[in-house]
Amino acid sequence: MLLDQNTVLSDKQTITTSAASTHTIDATAAGNVVPGGLFAVLRNEAAFAGATSVAFSLQTSDQDSFATLDTLVSATFTAAQLANANQLLLALPIPAKIKRYIRAYYTVTGTATAGSVTCFLTDLVDQK
């Protein structure tokens, strides 16, 4: 699988508090986006500690501020699911209702002291 850096939302981003991804994607700059043909992939890079759960959502908006937004896909992971590093957490197809901007958002429950993720969009998924 080839990974385009322009489709990376989080690159080993440390998640200890609720936060948006460090990067957003401007779908108009990407050229021909293929809604429904892309997957949102989330990998656990470093084991989480202290968090009860972490909710992931892929959000889209017409505004780069995400003042109003829609959630494309979401999932919540328990402490047990986040306890191991270097694992695929999810690979979900993106629905066809993409607006101009796309970002990931992580909602932490509990007091996370460690943990990081990588999130990106791709047309092929490596299940390893």
Image: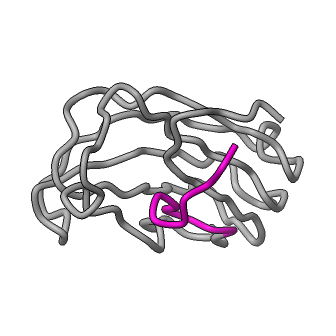
Percent of width and height locating residue 119: 57, 54
Residue for point 22% across, 40% down: 98
10 sits left or right of 6 in the view: right
73 sits left or right of 54 in the view: left
The residue lying toward the viewer, choosing from 116 and 12, is 12
Quarter of the N terminus within the rendering: top right
Whether residue 9 is in magenta: the answer is: yes
Residue for point 85% across, 51% down: 86
Residue for point 58% across, 42% down: 41
Percent of width and height locating residue 58: 39, 45
> What coloring was used for the rendering?
one colour
Would you identify the image quadrant in which residue 20 lies? bottom left
Residue 55 in the image: above or below residue 31: above
Q: Give the range drawn in magenta.
A: 1-12
78 sits left or right of 9 in the view: right
Whether residue 62 is in magenta: the answer is: no
Residue 96 in the image: above or below residue 30: above
